[in-house]
Amino acid sequence: MKNFIENLPKAELHLHIEGSFEPKLMFEIAKRNNITIPYNSVEEIEEAYKFDCLQDFLDIYYQGAGVLINEQDFYDLTYSYLQKCASQNVRHTEIMFDPQTHTERGISFETVINGISKACDDAEEKLGVTSLLIMSYLRHLSEDDAFKTLKQSIPFKDKITAVGLDSSEKGNPPSKFKNVYEASVNEGYIPVAHAGEEGSADYVWEAIDILGIKRIDHGNNSLQDEKLVEEIVKRDMALTVCPLSNTALQVVDDLKNHPLKKMMDLGLKVTINSDDPAYFGGQVNKNYLEIQKALNLSKEEIYNLAKNSFQYSLLDTTKKQLYLNELEVYYTNNK
Ligand code: ADE
Ligand code: ZN
């Protein structure tokens, strides 16, 4: 099973580039930018990565992102993640980035997007990994602030596929971003959003009805509401589930109690993702491996999860089909 998962062609649909920032690279970049971080070693950093809830994690995550200053820093961060994709047979990835985390500190939008997108272009050419970018609005900030970000993004529209919504969920319902989502869709961005991670099923309803999202990030709490589950199935929307993130942030107490299998059995289209791999103890393959073990998933179920990852990606139909064919060949030869 380990080999089967490791060599399985797959896509990652829920990954925050700032959450892929490994401690070793963080030290390196902090040093070259003359920034002191409040840790003395990689071990000390890892020790600090123990979280009681989403906010606990976000405080440390924003602090870590504070060492990113130059275009090269964003390039190195992104390329380093894409190399991990290549080594895990992640053939395609949809990367979220949080412009406001950086523009709030005086870093220009251009610096951020150019560093990230150049790394994506190079990785496609040199590593054969394709990627799309999801610009995520920070929901603890105002809708006006999100509008500023949308405006800054316009000159770089050709590099960005979708908009997302992340950060502190409770108290910041999707409806707060109704107007900026409408404007983003008018600009041609595809809408997705985090919903139902810590927030209730009502937040998922808002995200699908008010923001019109095409895919739900996390969505665990959708299970609180039978009607909502039916609606998500009916609309054929996928959930980007992140098992190790869920245990690290105490959304789920133990992987053995993770609702993933229940979701699949209810007919929900589920995908497996790492969210913030540098903080939650594992890249995407580890997420597949651990959830497979915890829930005793079959090869067929793992194959279906990978299939969903391509099927519910934001790629065009032709590219999707190429990846699906590659997966089909792999499964036929390895089941
Ligand atoms: N930003 C990075 N990771 C996140 C998560 N799991 N939930 C909300 N916002 C995030
Ligand atoms: Zn996330």
Image (cartoon, rainbow, N blue to C red):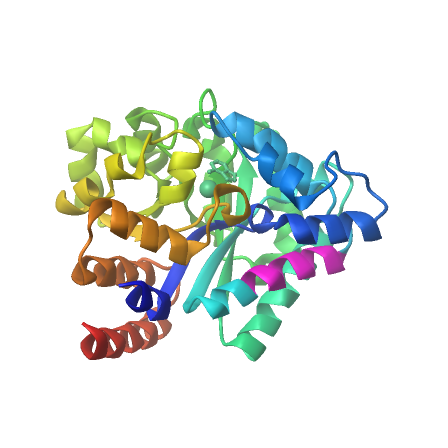
Q: How many marks?
A: 0
Q: Quadrant of the C terminus?
A: bottom left
Q: Magenta includes 2?
A: no
Answer with left or right where residue 115 lies relative to residue 255: right
Q: Magenta includes 75?
A: yes
Q: Looking at the rendering, which quadrant does residue 73 occupy?
A: bottom right
- Please tell me whether residue 129 is drawn above or below residue 252 in the rendered image: below
Q: Residue at x 68, y 61 (%)?
A: 75
Answer with left or right where residue 147 lies relative to residue 28: left
- Please tell me whether residue 233 is drawn above or below residue 285 in the rendered image: above
Q: Which percent across, then down, holds residue 116?
A: 63, 59
Q: Looking at the rendering, which quadrant does residue 71 occupy?
A: bottom right
- Please tell me whether residue 169 is drawn above or below residue 191 in the rendered image: above
Q: Residue at x 56, y 59 (%)?
A: 81
Residue 296 shows up from this direction: yes
Instruction: Provide the residue span drawn in magenta.
Output: 71-82
Q: Residue at x 46, y 54 (%)?
A: 283
Label the magenta part by its dominant secondary structure: helix
Q: Which percent across, then down, holds residue 263?
A: 20, 42
Q: Which percent across, then down, holds residue 91?
A: 42, 69
